[in-house]
Amino acid sequence: MRTASTSLLLLVMTLVSAFAATAHGQALVADLSRHHVAITTGFTGAEVLMFGAVDGEGDIVVVITGPPEDVVVRNKQRIAGIWVNAQTIKFEGVPNFYAVASTRPLSEIATPDVRENQQIGAENIAVTVSIADRGRPAEELTTFRAALIRNKQNEGLFSREPGEITVLSNRLFRTGIHFPANMATGAYTASVYLFHEGNAVQSISTPILVEKVGVGAEIYNFAHRQSALYGIAAIIIAVFAGWLGSVIFRKV
Amino acid sequence: MYIYLPIAEMSVNIFLILAMGGGIGFLSGLFGVGGGFLMTPLLIFIGVPAPVAVGTEANQIVASSVSGVIAHWRRGNVDFKMGAVLLAGGILGSSLGVLLFKFLQSLGQIDLAIKLCYVVFLGIIGGLMLVESVRTMLRARSASPRRGKLHQHNWLHGLPLKMRFRRSKLYISAILPFSIGAVVGLLSAVMGVGGGFIMVPAMIYLLGMPTSVVIGTSLFQIIFVTANVTFLQAVSTQTVDVLLAILLLAGAVVGAQFGSKYSVRLKGEQLRGLLAVMVIGVSSKIAYDLIVTPDDLYSIARLIVH
């Protein structure tokens, strides 16, 4: 509740300054309800509000991009009656997360070329094929790339349809961004584009940091930084728990 | 109530995990098995990545084997000398198993390898157990009990490096238990199981150990082999989720107590028959998943960059 009221206050304050800013000729201002998402032990996903103001006519598109990572796409084939991973293609620089929201359907805002150029819409995300796989037939690369996007969408990490942006009195806009629990940690970018007559006339970006905090973060860091010690600790905990179990239930 | 698992990197319902631990703990108490062969597939089924399921399950089995071995130790049902030889093989096998695991993971074939191991080994063991228990049930109705030698001797007992195992009343080649330990250790690392379901029949039928010391001795060996797997997985793949292991074993410890109380109500061959049906069930389900056409022929995997 406290965070909701704080973000509301923040919203009002930002909007006031937004009006001031637009008055000085800046056509687009925007901010987020928070720039930090903490993955705690009870984390089940997060909602972040993006809001802002725009001066003049146009469509607004909001794009959230997660930290880049390398992803391997595998294709199964039936071998001796069972499905086995056969071909693989590695893609580099794939954002872990991608969400888009817009005031109107994307096809009405800009032409496919413009959207591809600006990487707007999950199908237009720029990914690099690893050097080793660049010699593969173009057809195969297209199929694997489509499979990559489809799988990401099924995991809830890439948006299928653009989210809605609410516009108030032609000036103020806001949209809610949902971060699922399976998202990666790292630096995210929220970008806002102002489209006018099919072209992006202005854009601004702001960062969001997603990180693990609390007990979960400590367990993760322990496991990754001092993995030998972590392994020993895990064994000691298990031995103790097993012994405790046998002691507690001996008397029953 | 949801809890975020730091290593599996997913949010799960805490009560679902406790219930899984309790349910499988109950079955393991009932049948006197570790339950790893049920838990690992179940964890994968609820969406835990296969490497995390295998690494975490090894950690949980350490706990359940410790609790089990204490009871057997009090009754003197542990052959430590035999356990040590099995263990020497087990450490070698499980260390190789972790290396093999990492290699298969890099090829993208680890899921397939885990599933094939389950289908093959659970299928064979389940089938043998079913045949044996049905035979015992039929024999119990007709024949009278017969007395014979302690155990059958075969050429395997004649190998060199003979050792005397007093507790098991055996004088056999150490190569035999060492090899059994190594094979089971390898499977333990790849499948995320203790390996009791292979170890126990091997000890009875291949080594000819008396049934009374078999369970205690196998549990003793399993503690160290799964501890070795836990350690090596923690170091090489960082896939041991302590939080998940604690939740699972909290449920399992309680469940196992109820299970072992119920087990006295059933006859040995009935228990083995039921266990066999369950083992075959798991094996068939996994085999079915390998054969049926998946919804999407393409899959993706994040490459963890350090």
Image (cartoon, helix red, strand yellow):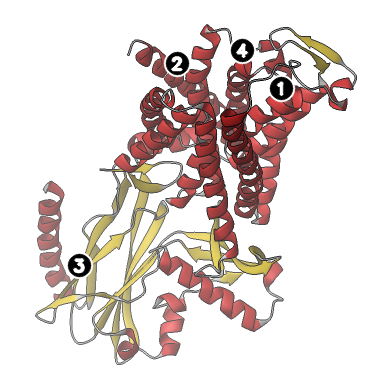
**Tag 3 subunit:** A
Q: Which residue is mark 1?
A: B86
Viewer-nearest residue: B257 or A223: B257
Marks 2 and 1: same chain? no
Q: Which residue is mark 4?
A: B78
Between circles 3 and 1, the one closer to the viewer is: 1
| Image: B88 above or below B188 | above
| Image: A124 above or below A219 | below
Viewer-nearest residue: A158 or A74: A74
User: Looking at the image, which residue is at 60% across and 42% down?
Assistant: B126
* Residue type pointed to by label 2: Trp
Distance from label 2 to label 3 (Cα)? 55 Å
**Tag 1 subunit:** B
Pointer 2 with pointer 3, Cβ within 8 A: no
User: Looking at the image, which residue is at 12% across and 52% down?
Assistant: A6
Viewer-nearest residue: B84 or B165: B165
Callout 1: 10 Å neighbours few (<14), some, many (20+)?
many
Check disc 1 and report its element: helix, strand or loop: helix
Check disc 3 and report its element: helix, strand or loop: strand
Residue B16, x across and y down, in percent:
33, 43
Between circles 4 and 1, the one closer to the viewer is: 4
Pointer 2 with pointer 1, Cβ within 8 A: no
Callout 2: 10 Å neighbours few (<14), some, many (20+)?
some
Distance from label 2 to label 4 (Cα)? 17 Å
Check disc 2 and report its element: helix, strand or loop: helix
Q: Of the residues under marks 4 and 1, which one precedes in the sequence? A: 4
Q: Which residue is mark 3?
A: A51
* Residue type pointed to by label 3: Phe
Distance from label 3 to label 1 (Cα)? 65 Å
Residue A88, x across and y down, in percent:
65, 66
Pointer 4 with pointer 3, Cβ within 8 A: no
Evaluate whether residue A225 shows in this view: no
